[in-house]
Amino acid sequence: MYKELNSIAIFIAVVDEGGFSKAAEKVGLTNSVISHHVTKLEESLGVTLLYRSTRQLKLSDKGQEFYTVASNALKSIEEAATEINSEGSDPSGQLHIAMPAFVPDQRLQALIWEFADLYKNLELKVSFSDDQKSLIEDGFDIAFRLGNLQSSGMMSRKILDVELMLVASPKLISNSKKITEPSDIVEMSCISLNQVRWSVFLSKGNMNEEVHISNKRIEVDNIYAARDAAVAGLGLIPLPLGLCGQEIADSKLVRILPEWQLSAIPLYAIWNNKARRNSVVRRLLSYLTDNY
């Protein structure tokens, strides 16, 4: 089949350009040569790919199937060649990044800024939000997401594990029964962050417990709002130390069950493997991996 690769590329050009004449202009060949290549490809495949008339060019059903597969394959080859040719050069253009509203480890953000400073011809567009953006529909090249990932067909890599602690206000604790065991928090009010299923996994030595809390009195879609609601005494919530450390130091929040450890939340990078800014995405991921 490798002998027909040139004919396949010409067939794709005919379909893309909507006719033999326009395809001939694009690739710099005569109409007769273009027609010869398409005919030769049809003979090789044993099917009719195009229905021709003096006024119209139409794909057959088999032609449509072949065009879809072949054009995608050709694009992949062209993109791979572009990436190889650009490996030795500095990345340029724009890299669109989706970040959570709260970045749990400031080193991650610092490394991204270092990466931008390293490659002067690269523009970074960074969006911070608790909403999970769609890479394809919203035009992101890479996204960093907290929590376990659902199957999406995207490429992913775990960047770090975010350690959590269960916190509440002194006011809420003083109005509750004494908390000594995980079962003591089951009936307490909690603050729910949309992205997090409200159960906590606690471990202490060889003991492990999962606690489901059904009293979701407050539900928010922003982690800063969740912290502030906890400070206001409206419920307990697991938070990263980086988000609540100052509030703990100021006695606005208190750690609950400090001898028990909460399961960490993973932070992943996800990207579309077919996105052709992938060479820049891979460089960013390598930079993070090498310098973390």
Image (cartoon, helix red, strand yellow):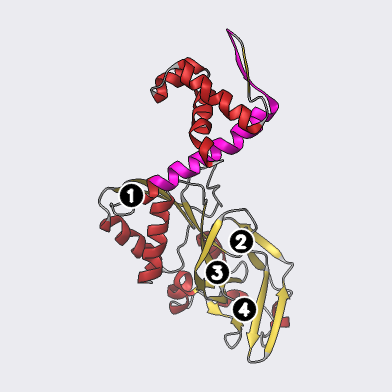
User: Image quadrant of residue 192?
Assistant: bottom right
Q: Which one is closest to the eye, mark 2 or mark 4?
A: 2
Q: Name the residue under label 1.
A: 86
Magenta segment boundaries in residue numbering:
54-81
* 2 and 1 marks in contact (CB < 8 Å): no
Q: Who's the residue at 38% across and 58% down the image? A: 283
Task: Name the amino acid type tagged 4.
Answer: Ile
Q: Mark 2 points at which residue?
A: 149
C-alpha span from label 2 to label 4: 33 Å
* Residue 71 drawn in magenta: yes
User: Is the magenta region chiefly helix, strand or loop?
Assistant: helix
Q: Which one is closest to the eye, mark 2 or mark 1?
A: 1
Q: Which one is closest to the eye, mark 1 or mark 4?
A: 1
Is disc 2 placed on a helix, strand or loop?
loop
Residue 107 lies left or right of residue 47; in this view the side is left
C-alpha span from label 2 to label 1: 31 Å
Is disc 4 placed on a helix, strand or loop?
helix
**Residue 72: percent from left, percent from top:** 55, 39
Q: Who's the residue at 66% across and 77% down the image? A: 201
Q: Which of marks 2 and 3 is nearer the N terminus?
A: 2
* Residue 207 drawn in magenta: no
Q: Who's the residue at 64% across and 33% down the image? A: 45
Task: Name the amino acid type tagged 1.
Answer: Ser
Vertically, is 12 above or below 149? above
Q: How many numbered marks appear?
A: 4
Q: Name the residue under label 4.
A: 173
